[in-house]
Image: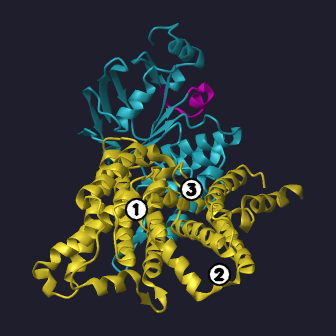
Amino acid sequence: MGMEYGAIRALAEVDYTVAPGEIVGLIGDNGAGKSTLVKIIAGNFPPTHGTMHFNGREVRFRGPEDARNAGIEVVYQDLALADNLSGAANVFLGRELRRRVAGLSIMDHAAMTRRAAQLFAELKSETRPEALVRTLSGGQRQAVAIARTRLAAAKLVLLDEPTASISVRQVAEVLDLMRRMRDHGQSVIFISHAMPHIFAVADRITVLRRGQKVADKPVGATSPEEVTALITGAVERA
Amino acid sequence: MAGASEPPALTARLRPRWWRRGMPQTQTAYVGVAFAALIVMIWILAPVFMTPRNLLNISKNFSFIALMSLGETLVIISGGIDLSVGSVCALSAVVTMMLMRFLSATAAAQLPGATITLAALGAMALAALIGLVNGLFIARIRLSSFVTTLGMLSVARGMTYVLTQGRAQYPVGPDVALFTRFANGAVLGLPTQLVYLLVLIVLMALALRHLVWGRHLYAVGGNAQAAALTGVRVPRVVVSVYVLSGLAAGFSGVLIAGWLGAAPANLATGYELRVIAAAVIGGANLAGGIGGAAGAAIGAALIEVIRNGFVLIGANTYWEEVFVGVIIIIAVLVDQLRTRRVF
């Protein structure tokens, strides 16, 4: 899978690739272009120039739906959940399971609850599928958001700050989950400020600064000190 | 072993007691309880309240508001507001009458029931069209629902005066008796208005609970951005609720016209506030994402029972509006306090 773009200023001529079954840590200061890159890959806005390849084919996403259909899922920093709905409802939002009753297509509540419970169990999360998201803890909300991507069996998952604002125990679980996704051949782009979390799971680290890629190397070939220097600009490029 | 006994205790705490979850936790539920208490209170103070004749009167009076509240509740769940319902109701009522008169002079008069059927459908199509215009401005051009429907309140009311030149309209033609039976008759001893209302409450409750459309409507009201990100067609959902609100107001207008046997141009003036009050008392949250069919009807019934009770008890009816206002505030206040777990 290969991608290259450039959205003016926000992102200038960034070559970016993710291999199947690889966890790539994406790191950079605020305004470095991480969100822009994520939104382009997720189909939220098209790159102003450049091309994107996914699964060996050139793709052009007109909206998030196109990206999802191609097998790309995003877990947003603000989690993008509807607080007034249950965990199960959020997992299945936009792709509700249906059954036909008297020629009418209605939602299959029982099947969605069952499947959601299964997904939460896989995540080792204590989230109850029927509980309203409003009543859930930060970690449980994260589980709901990640369960969405598991449901879709996405080939590439973008996690935007998944370990921010959750408990230490849940962080370990989320990192475990990423490893399990990799074992299943899923690719993960892990966007985070938390250097230890990235070094714990990532195979490769990409550093963005002012819309440019300043480093892209295997975890073993770099160190938190070097990455910090790259983020701040103390080191220009590596 | 302390470690082994921990998980069950955790599970027990994860699942709250029954009154802390689901239906009993909603505003609709405790407003329903308050409603029942109010009925008992009025019954004790004025036994005439429970006579079939009085109950019949109440059910007819509140049905019109409740019907409009159903549509309004959908709009409120989506996170918007529809101020145009009173005017659309009046426009629909006068257009029904005028179409009836016009059709009575055409071939439609030969076929029994044709003039009133076509007239009612025409009026409701116009009401749906107004809802569509509201919805398109709000969903596509992203105007505020308050301003758009405030403008439409004026447009629809103005059109009502332009069409009628301020004169009241009356039903004419071969179907007048049928119209009265349809709008103000009885089915199994129940007034037809109430029957239509009950049927629509059930349909709306089922649609909200079981159709993907209903799920998406709550998602749009809860977090429109999240809904859009997951692929929910937000504009389509938003347009649909304004069309349904227009249809509900239009249907209510047809029924009021048939019930009164006349449609003055100033019909249903100010009803939008009663309609919104009913929806809000019944548990619809103006912030969006919360509300239901039963709540809208309970809210409308509560307001009507208060009106009726004031008259029966012989209280100074000038206090009635004050009382309704206090109820609105208390209903929302109690909901807030419960959300904050004050009790």
Question: Does residue A9 appear left or right of residue A222 in this picture?
Answer: left
Report the residue that reaches farthest toward the bottom: B188
Q: CA distance from mark 1 to mark 2?
A: 40 Å
Q: Nearer the viewer, mark 1 or mark 2?
A: 2
Residue B293 part of the magenta segment: no
Whether B199 is drawn above or below B187: the answer is above
- Image marks 2 and 3: residues in contact by CB distance under 8 Å: no
At x 41%, y 59%, the residue is B86
Question: Does residue B156 appear left or right of residue B17 in this picture?
Answer: left
Chain A, colour shown: cyan
Residue A24, image x and y in percent? 47, 32
Say which amino acid is labelled 3. Answer: Gly
* Residue B110 shows in the view: yes
Magenta range is: A193-205
Say which amino acid is labelled 1. Answer: Trp
- Image marks 1 and 2: residues in contact by CB distance under 8 Å: no
Q: Which chain is yellow?
A: B
Q: Which mark is residue A53?
A: none
SS of the residue under disc 2: helix
Q: Earlier in the sequence, mark 1 or mark 2?
A: 2
User: On what subunit does the disc labeled 1 rest?
Assistant: B
Say which amino acid is labelled 2. Answer: Phe
Label 1, on which residue? B213
Label 3, on which residue? A87
Question: Does residue A171 appear left or right of residue B259 in this picture?
Answer: right
Are labels 1 and 2 on one chain?
yes
